[in-house]
Image (cartoon, rainbow, N blue to C red):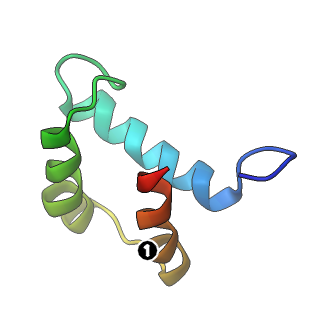
């Protein structure tokens, strides 16, 4: 994130996270749990998305934050 707002990569990944949440988390798009994160990373992302090298590199740092 920059002083002026989210970076384009952060915004792209956030959109992916919300798409996953809306479609697959029964309790709502913001009801994340460790299990939901695991399913996102090990099942949904590899099957449903194509991340470029910059997005893949940023993914781990963004999830840590």
Would you call the spot at circle 1 few (<14 residues within 10 Å), some (14-19), or many (20 or more)? few
Q: Residue furthest top?
A: 27
Q: Please name the residue shown 39% across and 43% down the image.
A: 17
Q: Please name the residue shown 79% across and 44% down the image.
A: 5
Q: Quadrant of residue 24?
A: top left
Q: Is residue 34 left or right of residue 14?
A: left
Residue behind mark 1: 56
Using the image, determine if residue 41 lies above or below residue 4. below
Q: Is residue 21 left or right of residue 52?
A: left
Using the image, determine if residue 34 lies above or below residue 2. above
Using the image, determine if residue 35 lies above or below residue 1. above
Q: Position of residue 58 (x, y in %)?
A: 52, 69
Q: Quadrant of residue 21?
A: top left
> SS for tag 1?
helix
Q: Residue furthest front?
A: 64
Q: Please name the residue shown 41% across and 36% down the image.
A: 18
Q: Give the total of numbered labels.
A: 1
Judging depth in this view, the residue of 24 and 4 nearest the camera is: 4
Judging depth in this view, the residue of 20 and 56 nearest the camera is: 56
Q: Is residue 27 left or right of residue 64?
A: left
Q: Please name the residue shown 23% across and 46% down the image.
A: 37
Using the image, determine if residue 17 lies above or below residue 55. above
Q: Position of residue 6 (x, y in %)?
A: 71, 48
Q: Residue furthest bottom?
A: 53
């Amino acid at each position: 994130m920059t002083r002026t707002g989210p970076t384009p990569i952060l915004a792209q990944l956030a959109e992916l996270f919300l798409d996953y949440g809306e479609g697959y988390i029964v309790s709502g798009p913001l009801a994340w749990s460790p299990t939901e994160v695991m399913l996102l990373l090990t099942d949904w992302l590899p099957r449903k998305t194509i991340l470029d090298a910059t997005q893949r590199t940023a993914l781990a740092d963004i999830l840590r934050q």
